[in-house]
Image (cartoon, grey):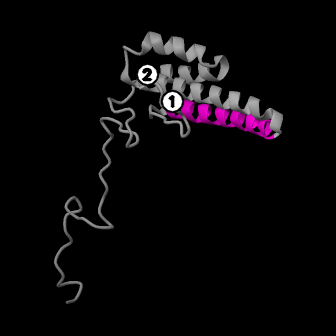
Amino acid sequence: MSEFNSPPPADASTTTGPGAPVSVTPPMSYSVGTAGGYSGPPATADEKNMAMLIYLLGIFTGFIGPLILWLIKKEQSPFINDQGKEVLNFQITTILAMIISIILIFVIIGIFLYFGVIIAYLVLMIMGLLKAKEGIPYRFPFALRLLK
């Protein structure tokens, strides 16, 4: 067949395959991880700001700031409730890692572990803050999930 005898191309909306257009629809809910996580409506601008504040307070006040904000706002938003619990779980994990590294200072390796925990803490909290800014629930990779 020549190019003049070939059938007309199929409508682009019905085409499937590598050249087909991709339809992207925004998710109605997020589901993070297979072991649970946030599954609820997308975060509003106010919820994103509160979640960012939880992460920011975590950096500067330890667990006290996030705990107070989480206790105040946990009933108002499932996103804030989830991210507040996540930050508090990470705070507990970090405190335990700091205690272990202080004990190991007597074996010299604790000094390196101590500074490694501080650097990892800051980096992971900033990553969580940036994800909260986008409204995406963040899961810390090494956090003990004590608050469910």
Q: Is residue 83 above or below residue 8?
A: above
Task: Identify the residue at horizontal 60%, vertical 31% (top origin).
Answer: 125
Considering the image in quadrants, where does the C terminus appear? top left
Q: Which residues are magenta?
A: 109-131
Compare residues 135 and 120 and report the one nearer the observer.
120
Say which residue label 2 marks.
80
- The amino acid sitting under disc 2 is Ile
Q: Residues within 10 Å of mark 2 (few under 14, many from 20)?
A: many
- In the displayed structure, does residue 43 sit left or right of residue 91? left
Q: Which mark is residue 84?
A: none
Residue 53 placement (x, y as % from top left): 55, 20
Q: CA distance from mark 1 to mark 2?
A: 12 Å
Of the numbered discs 1 and 2, the one sitting upstream in the chain is: 2
Examine the structure image and report whether residue 92 is included in the region drawn in magenta. Answer: no
Residue 131 placement (x, y as % from top left): 51, 34
Compare residues 25 and 83 and report the one nearer the observer.
83
Residue 26 placement (x, y as % from top left): 33, 40
SS at badge 2: helix
Task: Identify the residue at horizontal 69%, vertical 27% (top origin).
Answer: 99
Compare residues 67 and 49 and report the one nearer the observer.
67
Q: Residues within 10 Å of mark 1 (few under 14, many from 20)?
A: some
Q: Disc 1 vs disc 2: which is toward the camera?
A: 2
- The amino acid sitting under disc 1 is Lys
Considering the image in quadrants, where does the N terminus appear? bottom left
SS at badge 1: helix
- In the displayed structure, does residue 79 sit left or right of residue 124? left
Q: Is residue 71 above or below residue 95?
A: above
> How many numbered marks have been drawn onto this rendered protein structure?
2
Residue 93 placement (x, y as % from top left): 59, 30
Task: Identify the residue at horizontal 51%, vertical 13% (top origin).
Answer: 69
Say which residue label 1 marks.
133
Query: Please, what is the dominant secondary structure of the magenta stretch?
Result: helix
